Amino acid sequence: MNANTRTTLVEMLTDRGHSIIEDVDESVIIASNPTSNKKIIVYRVQDPKVSVKNIKQLKNIIDEYDHSFSCLIVIYKTSISTFAKQFISTEVEDMLVQLYSEKELRFNITKHELVPTHRLLKANEKENLLSRYKLKHLPVILTSDPVCRYYGCLSGDILEITRQSETCDLYTLFRLVV
């Protein structure tokens, strides 16, 4: 794995509140969140194109660890076959699956000067926001948005976005993830 890719991956796991507990080899990393006890497994495919064979190997690795992972991150070099995507959707159940190319992880998008600060609200903060302002509808942001993917947002989550402004110093807005 490229050094920049690995750095961005470690930053992404840290920003999600996870720390690496096991770095098996070049292809498998396991991270855990100490407060929520959720675990993430990161699998890097060594082959240039991801095939069903690679996903079967991944499935065996997941079964071998017998952990209840909440998220699977697959990092691939160039592309992933349609059959491999179908196999992932049918065989890997009860966890969020995220696919990243190494090219996408070469730099941390949250550190770019044009990307405002994003923060995922906790459940109690979400309830307080909705009840305090009596909100029924919020502007939306898609789960496919690069920042939502970075933070592992699910539908129903709320992001707090803090931006610099020319007229007022900072302003905060909220987006509902759909």
Image (cartoon, rainbow, N blue to C red):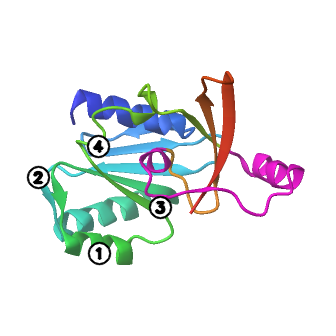
Residue drawn 52% across the image and 50% down it: 39
What is the C-alpha distance between the residues marked 3 and 2?
Answer: 23 Å
Task: State which tag comes first along the sequence, 1 or 2.
Answer: 2
Q: Gap between marks 2 and 4, in whole Å?
A: 15 Å
Left or right: where 96 falls relative to 9: right
Q: Which numbered mark, 4 or 1, is in the foreground of this view?
A: 4
Q: Disc 1 to disc 2, how far (Cα)?
A: 18 Å
Cα gap from disc 4 to disc 3, whole angstroms:
18 Å
- Residue lying at 32% horizontally and 66% vertically, measured from the top left: 59
Q: Name the outermost residue toward the left.
A: 48
Residue under pointer 3: 96
In this picture, which residue range is highlighted in magenta?
Answer: 121-150
Mark toward the start of the polypeptide (3 vs 1): 1
Is residue 146 placed above or below 17 in the rendered structure? below
Residue designated by label 2: 48
Image-based side of 51 in relation to 139, left or right: left
Instruction: Give the mark nearer the N terminus: 2 vs 4.
Output: 2
Q: Nearer the viewer, residue 91 or 160?
A: 160
Q: Nearer the viewer, residue 152 or 47?
A: 152
Q: Please give the residue where the numbered disc 1 appears in the rendered image.
A: 87
